[in-house]
Each structure stands twice: as C-alpha cells, then as structure tokens.
Amino acid sequence: MRITDVTLWHVSRPLPAPFYPSWIPGLPQTENRFTLVRVGTSSGLCGFSAGPAMGRERAGLGDLLGPYMIGERADDIASIRQRLREMSYLGWHLGWLEAACWDVVGKARGVPVYRLFGAEPGPVTLYASTGEVKGGRERAAELEQRRSEGFTAAKLRVHKDTLADDLDQIEVARQAMGPEFTMGIDANQGWRVAVVADAPAWDLSRATAFANRAHELGYAWLEEPLPNDDYDAMAALRRATPLPIAGAELNHHGLPEIAVMLEKGCLDVYQPDAVFAGGISETWKIVSAVAKAGARYTPHTWTNGIGFAINLQLFGASPWRADTLLEFPIAGPGWLPEFRDALLETPWLHDRGTLQLPTAPGLGFSIDEGQLWRFGSQFFRATKFRMALHAVLDKGIATAKEIGRVRDARLAARLAEVDALQKAGGDPIAPFVAPVAASVKAGWKLADGGSPAAGGCASTSPASDSAGS
C-alpha cells in the first residue's frame, strides 16, 4: 500500500443563505470552504480527508506535501506521523492529512476505522449544535424546532458584549424548553477572533459568574469560557463552579499540551478535534490520557462532513459512546447537512437525534465525483514522475538524482522493516489502536472536584491485495 498519488483541491460549496458564525463576529459566511486531499496507493485504494479553509491559503501546500508522502506506506502510521511532524516545523498544522491514510487502512481491511480500535457498530446520541448568536426568544424557537425533529439535547452560543445579555438568552431558553431538555453552552472564548467586528473577551470573574448562573438554571456544561492557553484560569474556574467545563477543541499541539491541562485539572470534558489536534492517532493518545485522568471525551466536530466523519469514528470507538453526547452541527437556514457535508454522496443525517455508526469501510463515506467537479478546483497532484520532474527543474539533474537515490534508499530500508514486522506477526498500526478503558461515572464533573488522578479508486481492498503491497 505505498502512496503513489497525492491530489489536492480547493472546495467551495455555496450555502443556501448567509451563516453568521458566533466565533467570528461580523463575518457572514456564504460558502463552505475546505481543502480536500486524496491519497492514492499501489493497491488501487484511495483515502480522503479535508481541512477547513478561509480561502486558498494552502495553495503552496503541494510542493511540500508530495516529496514527504510519495513512496511511504499508507499503513505505516509511525512514518506518516513523522513526515507530518517534519512538515509542521515550517508552521503548517497538517494532522488532518493523516486521516486519509486511516481511510485507506480501513478500506484495505474491509472495516470502518472505529473497528480498527476494537469497537462495534451501534448508535450514538447527538446534541444539536447551534452556530449563531441569537436573542432568547429567537433561540427558543430554534430549539423548539430541534426538539420537534427528535433531539433531546442542544448547545447554545453566547457571545454578546455584556454578561447580562448572555444571561438573558440562557434564562429565556431554559424557561421555554423546560428542565427535561438537556442544554450546554459554548462561549467561544477559547480562540477569540476579532478580525471583522470586535469580540467580547471573558475573564475569570465573568466566566465564573456565568457558569454559576448556568448551573442554577440546569445547564449541563459550558465550553471554551476562557482562552485555550490560559491553563491556570481554566483550572481555577473548574474548581470554582459545579458546572462541568469543556474545551481543548482546537489545541494544536496534541498530547503534550493536553497532558499539561490534565495535570493542572483544567477541564472536566476534553473535546479535541482530530482535524486540528494532530490527526486520528494523536487524538487517540489524548483519549487514552483523558480516560486515565478520570475526565471525559467527546469531540468538537464543526468543520465539514469529512471532519465530522473523522471525529465520529473516534467517538464511536471511545468508552464514553453509550452515555455521552456527540456534537451535530446544524444551524438553518445557512448551515444544513447537505451543505455542511459538501461532496459526500450521502450526508450525515440524524434519526430523531441519533445516528448509527457507518458500516462502510474506512471513514464511512464516498465522494460524489459530480459535486467535486462542480465545487472543487484541483490545484496540485503529485506522482513519482511529477515529483522527479519537479526536482530536476528545481535542483538540476545531478542533484535531483542524488536526492532521489538517498530518499529511495531510506524508503526501501523502512519498507523492509515493516515487511519483517508483518512476517513476524506484527501490525504497523498496533501501537496506535490500543483499546481505551474508562470507568464511566454518573455526571460529567470530575469526581474529586480538583486535579484529576495521575495516571477513481476501489472502495474496498481487492481480494488480491496484500498488506505488504
């Protein structure tokens, strides 16, 4: 399963109506934009992933990506992780690319990715995740619509200038929905954006006052109430309120950063999004650490349909699947599943607030080639020949040949190592798929109230394909 082809597209899917994300005040979003990657392999299998985008800011990514990926084995996750780490030295956060390799591995083995981690098919319970800031009455009407569709839980957004305005929304919403409807709140303070309009900046005092009032009103959790790197303030807030505090959705530095947060006791619920947190393998390491610390995991999923699929697979494998809610982004009239899930043949649709884990191999979706042709713009493709030609034009033939010889020798040595591992009964993905066990407790708050305990491609593998191809 050597990587033979890496292709990138800019994707821009117009929305049916402007969407005003609470996390970027003043910016009407009129398109769902992301970068799509397809990783092709010698087996004929392809894997896909996507990274959210503001525009075409990744236009130069291909020149870096091709030389690092071509020739690697898609199932050699250790090497893929190292290549992505090396590219990050230049400032790119590229963990989202790793999911395309997991897509290939799942297809090669004929199973969904969550089964690689030891999980079985079944349902997950969703909460409707709103995306815009609204007044209390308007929010109540939106939540009533979600309830009529079968949801029993939802998340509100607060991002008003004053504490009083934010409290007014959650008070009106609670009065309208009654105590039986589960509600959380996202303050969107973790990664404050004020590039268009100014955005409120919470401090510990405001966050504490808001959290305690939300607890009095029966809210279930509060997300991102403080900057995502203000670890001491988050820990102080978590100790100061009985309301579960959630976050860490866009903390880019993976387990090393989350380990600091766990040690300090910053959060009750950790929400790493594998698109941002370093990929599937890094996020699973985080899930394991969260379990050992006695906290809880449920991911952020608000990117696009492919990002949702990636995090759905991980949540489906987690020990909290049966008693924890998963985010389902929906905010009409602009952000609806068929537009959120641009390019997917089948959007992710809920059934009365639940979703069955996919049984298709890999990440569980197929790309609609017609939509890709309509809404995508290919801007890069790497093959071994194209990469060699580029090297000749860039470095000259003598230098290009020398680089190629050295690189080929490294790849051959690594391929021999993986082949030897498999012949001895080993599996290159084994270090990254160890099952995670957790003692699932009632409620989402850490039990001790303080710091946690230490702690065109084929859709499936052809019958003739082997793991060593």
Image (cartoon, helix red, strand yellow):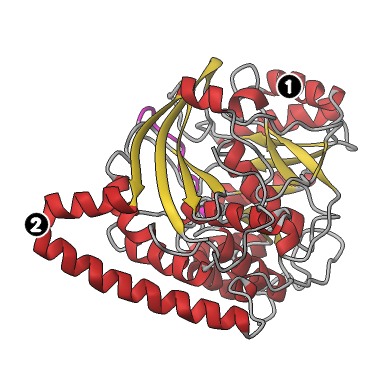
- In the rendered image, residue 399, in percent from the top left (x then y), is placed at 12, 64
Give the answer, above or below, for where 41 lies relative to 372: below
Tag 1 residue = 142
Foreground pick, 412 / 30? 412
- Residue 223 visible to the viewer: yes
Name, please, the residue furthest toward the front. Answer: 464
- The residue under the point 46% across, 66% down is 81
Q: Quadrant of residue 469?
A: bottom right
x and y percent of residue 386 in the render?
A: 28, 47
Q: Nearer the viewer, residue 134 or 56?
A: 56
| Residue 202 within the segment the image draws in magenta | yes
Residue 315 vertical placement versus 434 (above, below): above
Say which residue label 2 marks. Answer: 396
Q: Main secondary structure of the magenta part?
A: loop
Q: Amino acid at mark 2?
A: Gly
* Secondary element type, mark 1: helix
Of residues 228 and 215, the one drawn nearer to the viewer in this rendering: 228
Q: Which residues are magenta?
A: 196-204
Alpha carbon separation for disc pair 2 and 1 = 62 Å
Location of residue 147 by image quarter: top right
